[in-house]
Image (cartoon, grey):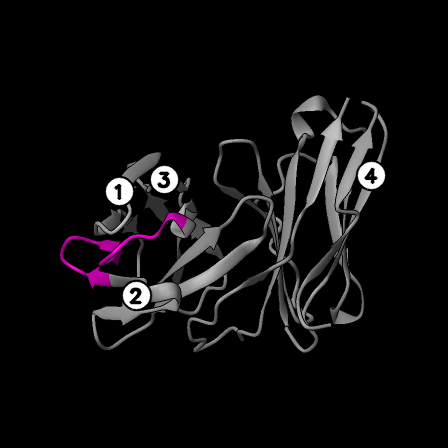
Amino acid sequence: AQSVAQPEDQVNVAEGNPLTVKCTYSVSGNPYLFWYVQYPNRGLQFLLKYITGDNLVKGSYGFEAEFNKSQTSFHLKKPSALVSDSALYFCAVRVHNFNKFYFGSGTKLNVKP
Amino acid sequence: GAGVSQSPSNKVTEKGKDVELRCDPISGHTALYWYRQSLGQGLEFLIYFQGNSAPDKSGLPSDRFSAERTGGSVSTLTIQRTQQEDSAVYLCASSSSQLAGSRGDEQFFGPGTRLTVL
């Protein structure tokens, strides 16, 4: 069965510090991996995706994520957090040749001034 | 329009009533998804449409839930005899991806419909 795990319900960081939001996955086949962000009272917005190639992918708002095949992980990172990054972050996986997406349970990121 | 739209934005109904939720995907997008997001929960897949293919209904929680997509565009999610546990935000997303050999085309989400069943 395909699944995505976000082990942390909440991540707290101070503004200016680096942040990491963790995601691990379990799929049979080659994964396509995604990160989405949901701001309060807003719809989900696409941040970045890994399809193939360079394991480090860069996305919107200065976020990046590293695909690690051996650890089946796709952690979201940002070198310097902003208060405005505070939101709910979802990791998702899709398997090649299948269109169904599997979402993690979400991680609430709190960035404090 | 430029993005995915959903209506209504909020719906309050009484237990036992039927409701219809509408989704207008991005023009030209062949794939359409419905998800349910309960308070404090992640996204729960409900149903997926791809072009003219039979929909993937594997995520529908009960036979009270159904969805259709007319003309490969607008979709309606219907919940019959609503229950309090149906209260959630219902999200629609569309994608331009094709089936075989598809690349990782991302989904574009609508703002959701917040359903409250009293």
Front label number (2 vs 4):
4
Name the side, left or right, on which A67 lies relative to A35: left
Q: Which residue position is annotated with label 2? A: A30
Q: Which residue position is annotated with label 4? A: B19
Q: Which residue position is annotated with label 1? A: A14
CB atoms of marks 2 and 4 within 8 Å: no
- Judge whether residue B102 can be spotted in this image: yes
- In this view, A43 is above or below A7: below
Q: Position of residue A40 (x, y in %)?
A: 54, 44
Give the magenta part as a residue range.
A66-83
Label placed on residue A110? 3
Secondary element at image label 4: strand
Q: Position of residue A21 (x, y in %)?
A: 28, 47
Secondary element at image label 1: strand
- Callout 1, which amino acid? Ala
Give me the residue at 25% from left, 51% from top: A16
Give me the residue at 26% from left, 58% from top: A78
**Given the current orientation, which residue lies at the most extreme left position?**
A70
Earlier residue among tags 2 and 1? 1
Q: Is residue B6 magenta?
A: no
Gap in angstroms between the C-alphas marked 3 and 4: 36 Å
Front label number (4 vs 1):
1
Q: Position of residue B37 (x, y in %)?
A: 57, 39
- Callout 4, which amino acid? Val
Total number of numbered labels? 4
- Callout 2, which amino acid? Asn
Gap in angstroms between the C-alphas marked 3 and 2: 32 Å
